[in-house]
Amino acid sequence: MEHLFEFIGNHWALSIALVVITIAIIANEVLLLLQAGHALEPEQATQLYNRDDAVFVDLRGENAYLTAHLPGAVNLPLAHMDQQTEKLQQYAGRPVILYDEAGYQARKAGTKLKKLGMENVYQLKGGIGAWRDAGLPTKSK
């Protein structure tokens, strides 16, 4: 421990940079969480769907949606979200669970929906891949 204080004294600029970067990373993660909504494991999403009549929103393209999607999901590709936000307004009072292939686009879409005033926005952690890995059912059209 005595060497730590000696290191900080000898390399104060480096130590300050480390503290500032650490704070910036933590602040960024907290901000993303607050803006985009909470991430749910597949089991938690299933409970929310069954208990609170949540709606699943598939952010993938139409072909991927037709191949396999979560039961009861509506297809709203992220690329078209700006033009079709009124489609989601009908679900304003219900929890909305966003998902894509692996969960990366859901955070971006969650941030957009939060900015539009939707409050109960969640993402499926790991996307449809995590859903399949959990052994949960999918549907196809």
Image (cartoon, rainbow, N blue to C red):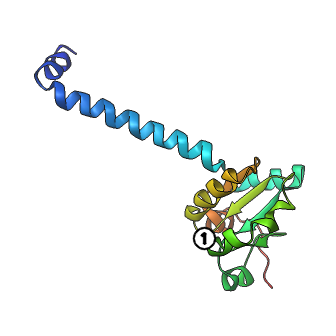
Q: Residue at x 25, y 28 (%)?
A: 16
Q: Quadrant of the N terminus?
A: top left
Residue visible at 19% across and 32% down in the picture: 14
For mark 1, what is the residue?
101
Q: What kind of element bears circle 1?
A: loop
Residue at 41%, 40% (x, y): give it: 25
- Does 9 appear above or below 96? above
Q: Is residue 101 visible?
A: yes
In the image, residue 81 lies at what x, y percent?
68, 69
Q: Is residue 40 visible?
A: no
For the residue marked with disc 1, what is the amino acid? Glu
* Location of residue 89 by image quarter: bottom right
| Residue 128, x across and y down, in percent | 66, 68
Q: Position of residue 120 (x, y in %)?
A: 77, 48
Front-most of residues 97 and 40: 97
Residue 115 drawn above or below residue 87: above
> As drawn, is 25 to the left or to the right of 130?
left
Identity of the residue furthest to the left in this view: 10
Residue at left offset 59%, top offset 62%: 103
Residue 122 image point, x, y percent: 70, 52
